[in-house]
Image: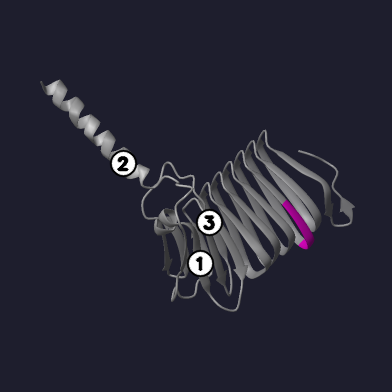
Amino acid sequence: MKRNIFLLAALAAALLCTSCLKNLRHDPNEPKKTHKIDDIGDFDKISVQAPCELIYEPSDSVKVVVSGGESFVDNIAIVNEDGRLIIKEKQNDFFHNGSVKVVVRSKTLQALDLEGAGSAQLKGEIKSDALSFNMNGAGSIMAESIHSDVLKVNVDGTGSVSLQDVTANDISMTMNGVGSVDATFSNSGSLNCAINGVGTFNLKGQVKSYKCETNGVGSVNTKELQVGDKVGNKES
């Protein structure tokens, strides 16, 4: 008797859970929705904690717009906490296969943190005194142009980072896991890298000094990296 009651309770819980998750599954025929968030306030840091596509553009004004399937847009929460814009899910969706795009504009950007399987694309020229990218998961970060005094990049997991046209005086990059970083530098200063695991660095362009520490079986390709007056020609 007790066993039957336990089985019925377990079945009811499973059906309830399935019903809740089903509401968040992607329906290709569901209506699209665009939601503009007003009065979000100024921010210079962004944390992406939801599986979405972030499009960031520097601008003289602040703008946040979310678009995609109606149920997915309704499930996205965006808040400003002490100058950090946080993009997250209201309810975790284990069966997420929809598409949500978040377009963000701000006056400055000092940090971008990306968790999970989301993606971030930084358009235009990003200017900052100090800029950091932190990747944790299987997402991707792409930037078209960066001008910063200090640049820090940290990758944990299987994520990828692609940085083009980087000009910075002090650059540090750390790889933990099996991710990858592709970066092209232009007239930059010191470049310090560290690989812990089996990650990959592909480094190109010009820097004044370069140093890399490798722990594990990770690889660094510097064949197209010019250090000082010399062109690197090694893969460690």
| N-terminal-most mark, 2 or 1 | 2
Seen at 49% across and 63% down, the residue is 66
- Identified by mark 2, the residue type is Ser
Q: Main secondary structure of the magenta part?
A: strand
Quadrant for residue 180, please give it: top right
Q: Nearer the viewer, mark 3 or mark 1?
A: 1
- Identified by mark 3, the residue type is Asp
Quadrant for residue 236, please give it: top right
Secondary structure under the numbered disc 3 in the rendered image? strand
Taking the view exactly as shown, the residue that stands out farthest to the bottom is 60
Residue bearing mark 1: 65
Q: Nearer the viewer, mark 2 or mark 1?
A: 2
| N-terminal-most mark, 3 or 1 | 1
Residue bearing mark 3: 113
Q: Considering the image in quadrants, where does the N terminus appear? A: top left
Do the CB atoms of the residues marked 2 and 1 lie less than 8 Å apart?
A: no
Q: Which mark is residue 19?
A: 2
- Identified by mark 1, the residue type is Val
Residues packed near mark 1 inside 10 Å, few (<14), some (14 to 19) or many (20 plus):
some
Q: In the image, residue 221 lies at what x, y percent? A: 77, 43
* Magenta extent: 183-188
Taking the view exactly as shown, the residue that stands out farthest to the front is 29
User: Would you say 149 lies left or right of 116 here?
Assistant: right
Secondary structure under the numbered disc 2 in the rendered image? helix
Q: In the image, residue 234 lies at what x, y percent? A: 82, 41
Do the CB atoms of the residues marked 2 and 3 lie less than 8 Å apart?
A: no
